Amino acid sequence: MNSSDREGDGARVVALLDRLAKNLHWAWHAEARRLFSELNPDLFRVVGRNPAALLRDLGPDRVAHAALRPGYLERLAKTVAQLDRYRDEPPARALVADVLKAFEGKGPIAYFCAEYGIHESLAIYAGGLGILAGDHLKSASDLGLPLVAVGLLYREGYLRQRLEEDGSQTSEYPRLDFDRQPLELLRDMGGSPLTVTVDIAGRTVTAQVWKALVGRVPLYLLDTDVPQNSPSDHWITARLYAGGLDNRIAQELLLAVGGMRALRKLGIEPSAFHMNEGHSAFLPLELIRERVLGKGETFEQARKHVASKILFTTHTPVPAGHDRFPLELVEQHLGELRKQLGLSPDELKALGRDPDDPLDRFCMTVLALKLSERANGVSELHGDVSRKMWRKLWPDRSPDMAPIAHVTNGVHAGSWIADPMKALLAKYLGADWLDRVSEKETWRAIDKVPDEELWEAQLESKEQLVSFVRFRVGRDILHKGKLPPQEIAAAAQLLSAPVLTIGFARRFATYKRADLLFADMERAVKLLDHSTRPVQIVYAGKAHPQDTHGQEVIRKVVQAARHPRLKNRVVFVEDYDIGVARELVAGVDVWLNNPRRPHEASGTSGQKAALNGALNVSILDGWWVEGWREDPLSGFAIGDDKVLEDQVAQDKKDAESLYEVLEKQVIPTYYERDRQGVPRKWVERMKHALKTLGPLYNTHRMVAEYARRFYVPSALGEVAR
């Protein structure tokens, strides 16, 4: 090859990698990630596995050098061609064929959410809500649904967690460099940034609009860090879930009102709307305003039309999880919008008034429920809890007839199943099994998988988890620079692949009871540090900066890990994010979940673990009520469905049940091996989990259900209530 040919191939590599990096499809496409990693594996890890940042740091000359590697350009060209076909040729999915037909000639579904968790490098998410939203977009893309998404672009994202030596949580907020992200700043015809304005508390706030591509789905993100705004208004999109009530209501106005105005400027006319949680509940008011001012309709006429187009999903059964604002703050921020709607202050307040709130505040969930024809919880149990929680909004109906349905959450299989398990499933379920992931027939082929191969795939993922934990803990010790060298050496010995491994990772809210395993410390030590049947547990999770009780639970867990007999049995991995979650759900044997029932709306981390063959050990709450009922052999239940009024007594009862389940069921089953060293009964349960839970708890099934039950009727303007 002469020099000109090399230069040509190098330029082609640079161009193709740039195209690949600009679409977040790489977040669930393993070969694309491998192509980037091979450029510089160490740097790729340092930049958070962010292809855009990697290419920027390497520079075009070093990137072009990849063209010299045998077969690299061919693999790259093939991967980009696959992305082009994926983007330009929507699939004919039988799962949603009727839905796609119904949307012919109609505008897309507009999906509004305050956070999106698509990949750990784009840190504009806090936890489960955002990760679910990201998975929703990925499945909508895979299924070819006409969907656009709207959110906010947080310059400092959500908190980065650091732990002091005593386990106290500290928060850091590094600024995101948007130029190092797969983002495009949209521009108007004159080349200036595309902007929208929103009246907030009597002042005009400007936001520019960015675009991220999530496969086929465009995600539009608003950013107030622009010269036109005052310093205080720059803060609106600085951090997710930070600041006081003034900033929170400003964020929610920007998301809903500004987000809708951005779609209008882009020429997008949605035919249906999905408000994912109450943060976007001001959206119906903006849609009503358009009809009142543009069509001369009364508020009630416009409300009926708008409500028929909207689905609202509520995600929490905990009263504190629903945004509430003082009535005077609502009038201060929405006064101008209220006047345009033709409403009096009392009429606006009535739209958000919760009869059960002794402080008489404006509740965003109440507003969303009153202005949406369709609403749902995120599991069967959560739907029931939500109907009872909000029953007073429909005083003429019995509690069980309140118009709140349910769609049980799922997870995006292509994003969360580890490579060893994916390869095994492709071998026995068929190369296209991910396209058929929600079909029960697909998963029945699990019975054909030899026990030895399934067990080997699990061990491979567990070894990767052990390596990951050792690296992360050692890195964090080095960064702190306070602990003695022997601590770093000890980190290199953490965990052991043959040992039964439990995972517990989620938001550290007190009701999730992360420290339940240590309710009886003597018994916990005996269980974990057993001479012949040891158990190890990996924790991860953040508490909200203002949740001092949740932070205290973290401190208790870290202190437990310092127990002389538990130093190699209990590990806390700092700064929980999508990357940490991906390693944990893939490598553990057991996923532990022990919230106070019925406070877990759904919980999807256990679903991610189940799709990797892990067994859930869980309170009968959220999705696990349905999963365990479907097939008790797919995991283990802690306690029963009875809830005691005495919380202390309930905690004691559940802790006792947890110990019993671990001591008498989980541990003996795991350590019962045949001559080949395979735990046959355990592997049998793994197969039950995959075969039973796989087709149900994935977002392909979930998104198709949303589309068929809610999006199509909304697009058609059908009245549901």
Image: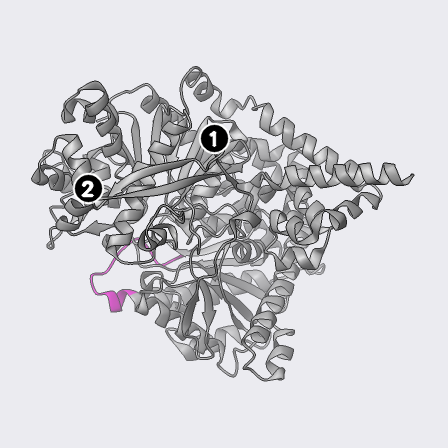
Colour scheme shown? one colour
- Toward the viewer: 162 or 605? 162
- Toward the viewer: 587 or 627? 587
Q: What is the number of the mark on residue 520?
A: none
Local crowd size for mark 2, using a 10 Å CA cut-off: few (<14), some (14–19), many (≥20):
many
Residue at position x 20%, y 61% from top? 645
Residue at position x 73%, y 38% from top? 76
**Residue 562 visible within the image:** yes
Residue 82: quadrant of the picture: top right
Question: If the image is split into quadrants, where does the N terminus sit?
Answer: top right
Residue type (three-letter) at the residue carrying disc 2: Leu
Q: What is the number of the mark on residue 190?
A: 1
Vertical relation: 616 (above or below) 15: below
Is 96 magenta? The answer is: no
Question: If the image is split into quadrants, where does the C terminus sit?
Answer: top left
Q: Which residue matches tag 2? A: 334
Vertical relation: 570 (above or below) 416: below
Vertical relation: 646 (above or below) 366: below
Is 470 positioned to the left or the right of 648 in the image? right
Residue 308: quadrant of the picture: top left
Q: Please report the bounds of the magenta region as a residue range.
A: 637-650
Looking at marks 2 and 1 on the same chain, the residue that comes earlier in the sequence is marked by 1
Residue at position x 70%, y 50% from top? 59
Q: Mark 2 against mark 1, which lies toward the viewer? A: 1
Q: How far across and how far down the image is residue 150, in percent?
A: 40, 37
Q: How far across and how far down the image is residue 437, in percent?
A: 55, 35
Q: CA distance from mark 2 to mark 1?
A: 32 Å
Q: How far across and how far down the image is residue 139, in percent?
A: 50, 35
